[in-house]
Amino acid sequence: MAYFFLRLLPPRPTFPHDGTGEEMAAMKRHVEYWHRHALAGTAIVVGPVFEGAGAFGMAVVEVEDQAAARTLADGDPIITSGFGFRFDILPMPSIILRPPAV
C-alpha cells in the first residue's frame, strides 16, 4: 500500500466564503463521499484548510498506487460536478501515525 496527500483546489481563491447554492450542494456530496472512504479505511484524514480569504481541501489516503489515488480523486462528486475544482496528488513515501485514541 502507498500513501498520498490530495490537495483539493477550488475554482477561485475566495471559495467557500462565496460558494453558490449549487456549489455548496456539491460540497455536501463531496463530504459524504469522503466520509464513506474514511469509514472504509481508505481515507486517513480529510478536511478543509483555511488560508487567506479562502480554503483548500486535503486528504491523506492509503491506496495501492498513484493510479488508485487518481481514481479516488476523479470519483469525488465535487470533481464530477464540473465547477472547476481539481486535485493535486502528491506521494508520501512514509508517514508516522499516532495510536488510535481510546
Image (cartoon, rainbow, N blue to C red):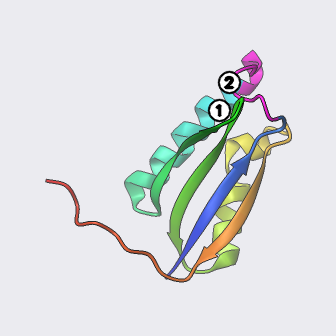
Badge 2 vs badge 1, beta-carbon distance below 8 Å: yes
Q: Is 93 left, or right, of 52 in this rendering? A: left
Q: Is 41 left, or right, of 3 in this rendering? A: left
Query: Mark 1, residues whose alpha carbon is within 10 Å: few (<14), some, or many (≥20)?
Result: some
Q: Position of residue 25 (x, y in %)?
A: 67, 24
Look at 80% across and 35% down and name the residue there. Answer: 13
Q: Position of residue 39 (x, y in %)?
A: 38, 52
The label shown at residue 27 is 1
When the figure is inspected, residue 102 is found, relative to residue 62, above or below; the finding is: above
Location of mark 2 (residue):
24
**Range drawn in magenta:** 13-23
**Splitting the image into 4 quarters, where does residue 7 fall?**
bottom right
**Residue type beneath disc 1:** Met
* CA gap, disc 2 and disc 1: 5 Å
Pick the front one: 86 or 34: 86
Task: Tell me the chief SS of the magenta region.
Answer: loop
Q: Position of residue 52 (x, y in %)?
A: 69, 34
**Residue type beneath disc 2:** Met
